[in-house]
Amino acid sequence: MNITIEDLQDALAAGRTIRDHGPYHVRIGMQGFDFKKVVLAEPVVTGNAILEAAEAFPVEQHLLFRITRSGVTEEIRPDSALDLRLDAVDRFVVFRSDRTFRFLLDERAFDWGASQISGATLKHLAGVDMSDHDAWQLGTDGTEALIEDDCFADLAAPGVERFITRHTGLTIVVNGKRKEVFRRRLSYWEVVRLAFPDAVKSENIIYTINYARGPHANPEGSMVDGQHVKIKENMVFYVTPTDRS
């Protein structure tokens, strides 16, 4: 007999009432947001049961958090019971750790099971569009530090770290003209059309792109069709068309 597994993420996204009996699919991220599907047989489960289903052994050396529909993380104790039908939760995060770290993100409190957190993870938790938002760490002296997607902020320092997200807004220079862009990576054709808005792919015209004053990862260089480049404030681009007809 085939047993249908109730996918909690699909049910919640569709606004469908979760059925009374299992099994259920939930998503569990190990050390972050690399989620995998895990099957839970019963509607009421303990923290230990979820850790065992995730094969997080030994369970006593791991911490379990649920991610609520609003994006907030909440620790689940090993002996705490959770009713999957009522608690509207479909995602969990597991850490091999014995300590939690609290921080504020967009004025909301979060608990985390690792001493560092990436810019990408902060944006995931905030529920913002990854492509056109930045994560910033707020210093006690009023300074702000950009936390790029693949960079990490330290949560182990004394006190509660504070972070915010906001829309990306950068000014770059393309063929001598200042252009405002709203993401930190641009494709070859996005750069071309900043210089030549009506540009289209053509066998007769090719565009050569060179750039300078870029970020540390790519301070200067060139671009070809299909490439993307990380950008920074006041980065300079030179776009030159060549007619091959």
Image (cartoon, grey):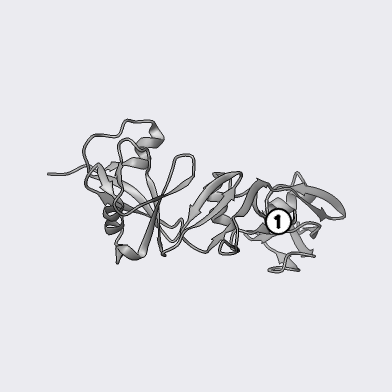
Position of residue 87 in the picture relative to residue 245 (left or right): left
Position of residue 70 in the picture relative to residue 138 (left or right): left
Residue 235 in view of the camera: yes
Image-quadrant location for residue 23: top left
Residue 238 in view of the camera: no
Q: Position of residue 141 (x, y in %)?
A: 75, 56
Q: Position of residue 114 (x, y in %)?
A: 48, 62
Quarter of the picture holding the N terminus? top left
Q: Residue at x 87, y 55 (%)?
A: 176
Q: Position of residue 192 (x, y in %)?
A: 74, 53
Secondary element at tag 1: loop
The residue sitting at the right extreme is 176
The residue identified by callout 1 is 140
* Closer to us: 109 or 27: 109
Image-quadrant location for residue 236: bottom right
Question: How many numbered marks have been drawn onto this rendered protein structure?
Answer: 1
* Closer to us: 132 or 86: 86
* Closer to us: 224 or 48: 48
Q: Position of residue 165 (x, y in %)?
A: 64, 47
The residue sitting at the front extreme is 158
Sort mark 1 into few (<14), some (14-19) or many (20+) by Cα contacts within 10 Å: few
